[in-house]
Amino acid sequence: MQPLIDGLIFIVDDDASVREALAWLLRSRRLASEHFGSAEAFEQYLDEAPLPDQPRCLLLDVRMPGMSGLVLFDRLAERGLLAEMPVIFLTGHADVPTAVEAVKRGAFDFCEKPFSDNALVDRIEQALGMSQRALEVQRVRRGLADRIAELTDRERDVMRLVVEGLPNKLIADQLAISVRTVEVHRARVFEKMEVKSAVELANRLRDL
Amino acid sequence: MADEALDVPAPPPPQQQPQRRGWGVAFARLRSLWKRWFLWLLLAVLVSALLVTVVWLAGRHEVEQVQAALERDTADAVVDLRSGLQRNAQSLRATLAPGMERTHWADRAAAQLREHREWLRLEWRDAQLQPIEAVNTPYRTRILEESNRGPAQADVAQACATARKAGAPAYSPSHYVPVAGGGGVEVMELCLPMDAGDYLVASYSLRDTLVELVGPTLTRGQEVAFTEADGTRLVALGTSRRIGTRVFTSQQRIDLPGASLMLRVDGWRAAPDLFPNMLTALVTAISIALVSVLVLLARDTRRRLRAERDLADALAFRKAMEDSVITGLRARDLQGRITYVNPAFCEMVGFTPEELMADSVEAPYWPTELAHEYHLRQTRRFAGGLPPREGFESVFMRKDGTRFPVLIFEAPLINAHKVQTGWMSAFIDVSEQRRVEELSRASQERLQASARLATVGEMASLLSHELTQPLAAIASYATGSLNLIGPEARGEQAEVAMAVKRIAEQADRAGQVIRSVHDFVRRRDRMREAVAPQALIDAVLPLVRLQARKLDVTIEIVCEERLPAVVCDRTLVEQVLLNLARNAMQAMDGADHAPGSRVLRLRVARALPVGATVPADGRRWLEFSVADLGCGISEEVAARLFTPFFTTRPDGMGLGLSLCRTVVEQHGGALMFEPNRPRGTVFRFTLPAAG
């Protein structure tokens, strides 16, 4: 088989044959997947280790013994995982209204069984794209946060005032330091934050 | 505010009013008393008057009798006196006729005096009234002085003159002659004229006259006296001892030539004699008897009055009872004629009592098409056929022609002489009962029908779920295979690709079929309405109660206040409640049967949406819970609880809970269960609230 696309799909369904068939279908489109027999098992998996840093997506059966798909969905929503791991509900015809409801509450999509063509896989790929974007944003934010963490307290004060648009002189007045010192701090902030201008710095920080 | 105003007590009524009313009541009572007792009073007065009159008359009659006897005695005494005096005069004339020797005369006179004690003295006088000879009575000491007797005696002279004129004896008025040593006697002179012109003068002592001439005829208790015309008593003779206190008096005049005297007789009687004789006693006795009879009569009348009043009360009570019962009552005589109907019966059939009691063979409330049959039944009844004790059903017709079913109880009507006089029947209009039965049967049928429908739906749902899983797998494999083969396949691979494509299509087609079946069954999904939670519980409660009574289960219902309505397919949700409640009660059936150990608790409360711990969206949810104190659910059963066709009961189909979950999930809710404290199980499901 061809090398896999960067991405991981979690399948949660109580029916083993459906899980295996789905996994096989996904592999045919060069998508890797992990499958779980119940919502509880998946939750346990989430708790055990951080997820690998790659786009991901969850195929979730609505109706399962024990914790239902909807309950799991709500818990994921509570943990704020929906953006980086979009959820696609797998439903029987009977559960369509429930699934529609779930989509309204933030699910990526739902797919009615039996799914005959590649439409499901296409949606999965879109979901992975969304996950990737979300992870990217997350990564950028995390980098920014790391950089801000590297700043000294004084540099952070200077940065705050620079972003507010104050000239060096006023900054010096407010912080009761010399203009020269302000310039040094400013240069250090630009260097550490990997920006070239105050505008670029402000834009970066707005993302946070 | 308005309510408060209403609560303000009315001003107290003026104090005079009750008093005035009291007076009025007292007056009315007096009047009724007067009315009631007037006749009795009148009767008593009349009886007393009669009694008094009779006694008085009897007394008067007796008095008259006594008086008459006295008068008679007096008259007899007068006659005795007269004849005695006359006889005396004659014997005087005979024995002392003049022309005799003086000595002889004296002897004869003395002899006469011995015979007649009433005389005090006999004198022979000449024409000039000079005494020739005189003899005194031997019984007395000399009373009359010689010296006083002569022509100078005016009364003697008067008497003699009268006697001479009449040629018959004459008397002088009486005069008092004192006696030496106190006292005196009343003396009356008799002058007898002689042929020779001389006179015989006899001095009567009035007292002795009474003793000699009247005395023997006197009876006990009588006093006889001479009085003058003016009533002055001269002499009296009689008992000194007086019997009784009442005196009867009779007096008669005795006219003697030359003198006039009154003879007076006093009779003493024991008085007053209230019961002096048999008549009075009899009258009194009869009166007493009469009064006693009257009193008895009065008492009897009073008893009768009381009995009448009691009877009237009893009648009124019976009437009120008959009028108040809703059971129709009808009495028939042995000929089948209606003799009595109560208002309830009239109201039931819509005929007036007059119409019902008309003399006809067929009752007006018999439906025309059944009249013959009823007639036969009636004939059979009168022939002695006893009706069933538990009553029998029949159909009657109202006046407007509508038919209605009645339950009839019949019993023979026995009079005071233990003779059957007819039949008494009680009727209960059971049309309302029938209607309710019909209604409850209809509602049960509706529930059963919906249960059937829900079961079919659940079967379809199960089939679709169970089939869609393998179909989904098939479709996935097919699609995956096509992906692997790729679009540029040639030769055999292209054939395989085509076949796999067909497989995918057929799987899709199977899915479509399932979908259409599903749609057909689920058409009622749209039948959502807003229903009050209490109404859902109320709808299933009768059926739940039925089973609860059989299994001796107590039902507790806890419904939070001011709950919003739930949006649901009412029939299906009722089915869920019924299923859960039945399961719960059956779970308690096997458990030990201590008091309070069998409680089914139905609860409705506000709830959070499924899976959320905080109200995530604006929608409100209601949670229904059904808790039992049964044996609980073991782990292996719990794992398969919602699996279709899984059941722990031999007669169960294993669709109940799975159906319940389908219904609840269709509404967007969830069905959960957990162990109850201290034992048993709680099933909970959520449904969206309206608004």
Image (cartoon, coloured by chain):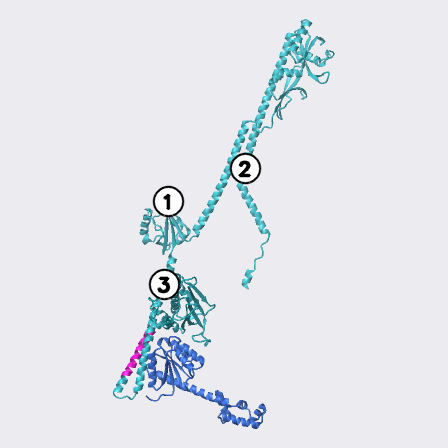
Q: Which residue is mark 3?
A: B442
Instruction: Give the image location of residue B271, x and y in percent.
Output: 60, 27
> Is B633 above or below relative to B148?
below
Colour chain A appears in: blue
Q: Which residues are magenta?
A: B499-519
Quarter-wise, where is residue B163 in the image? top right
Give the number of the disc on residue A84.
none
User: What kind of secondary structure does the magenta stretch mostly adopt?
Assistant: helix
The answer to whether any part of residue A101 appears in the image is no
Q: Is residue B166 left or right of residue A86?
A: right
Q: Which residue is mark 2?
A: B42
Name the N-terminal-most of marks 3 and 2.
Answer: 2
Q: Which residue is mark 1?
A: B421
- Identify the chain drawn in cyan: B
Q: CA distance from mark 2 to mark 1?
A: 47 Å
Instruction: Give the image location of residue A90, x and y in percent.
Output: 37, 79
Quarter-wise, where is residue B89 in the image? top right
> Is A120 above or below relative to B175?
below
